[in-house]
Amino acid sequence: MAGATPLLLMGIPQEVLSLLVVAVVFQLLLQHSNVSYFTGPFKYLLAVNVVHRFHHLKTAEEGDVNFGLFTTLTDRLLGTAYYDGERVIGSDDIGIGAQPDYPVGYLSQMLEPFRVPRVAGSLGRVNSLVSQSGEPKS
């Protein structure tokens, strides 16, 4: 919706927008798949799965790369393009390093952003700021 609404407001024909949505969905499926397909030297131009996989590495230092949807041109211009053909990325390399217990099931991942954060000691901090009578400490 966030990407389509500005295009609609600018007057893009609905048929063209529908085709764009199909292309984006198809590309996202390919980009996030483990399907092995040969792209040859085009992997340096196109945002294919072997290139995009680096974007999902656990740490921000490694994973803040390869944001492109269809091509790597913007990443090259912004200095965020990265590909190492020698590196083998396993399932242990992908994820959110700061949240090692992040849910693995589809439904639980969809619900995770809406859960109350589990921060150790957060209630203790709140309780230390409030006196026994319920009034904030000065």
Image (cartoon, rainbow, N blue to C red):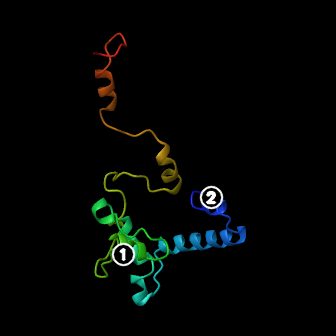
Kindly state the secondary structure of the residue where label 1 is placed. helix
Q: Is residue 93 above or below residue 121?
A: below
Say the numbered circle drawn on residue 5.
2
Residue found 62% across the figure and 58% down from its top: 5
Residue found 42% across the figure and 82% down from its top: 45
Q: Is residue 43 above or below residue 52?
A: below
In the image, 98: left or right of 45? left
The mark that comes first in sequence, 1 or 2, is 2
Report if residue 43 is visible in the image. yes
Kindly state the secondary structure of the residue where label 2 is placed. helix
Image quadrant where one finds the C terminus: top left
Where residue 47 sits in the image (x, y, percent)? 45, 76
Name the image quarter holding residue 125.
Answer: top left
Where residue 32 sits in the image (x, y, percent)? 47, 70
Name the image quarter holding residue 48.
Answer: bottom left
In the image, 18: left or right of 73? right
Q: Nearer the viewer, residue 134 or 88?
A: 134
Give the amino acid at mark 1. Arg
Where residue 36 sits in the image (x, y, percent)? 45, 82
Q: Which residue is mark 1?
A: 76
Residue found 35% across the figure and 69% down from its top: 78
Report if residue 59 is visible in the image. no
Give the amino acid at mark 2. Thr
Q: Nearer the viewer, residue 57 or 60?
A: 60
Residue that lies at the very extreme toward the front in this rendered image? 10
Q: Residues within 10 Å of mark 1 (few under 14, many from 20)?
A: some
Give the distance between the C-alpha atoms of the residues marked 1 and 2, in whole angstroms. Answer: 27 Å
For the residues bearing labels 1 and 2, Cβ distance under 8 angstroms:
no
Residue that lies at the very extreme toward the bottom in this rendered image? 40
Q: Is residue 117 above or below residue 14?
A: above
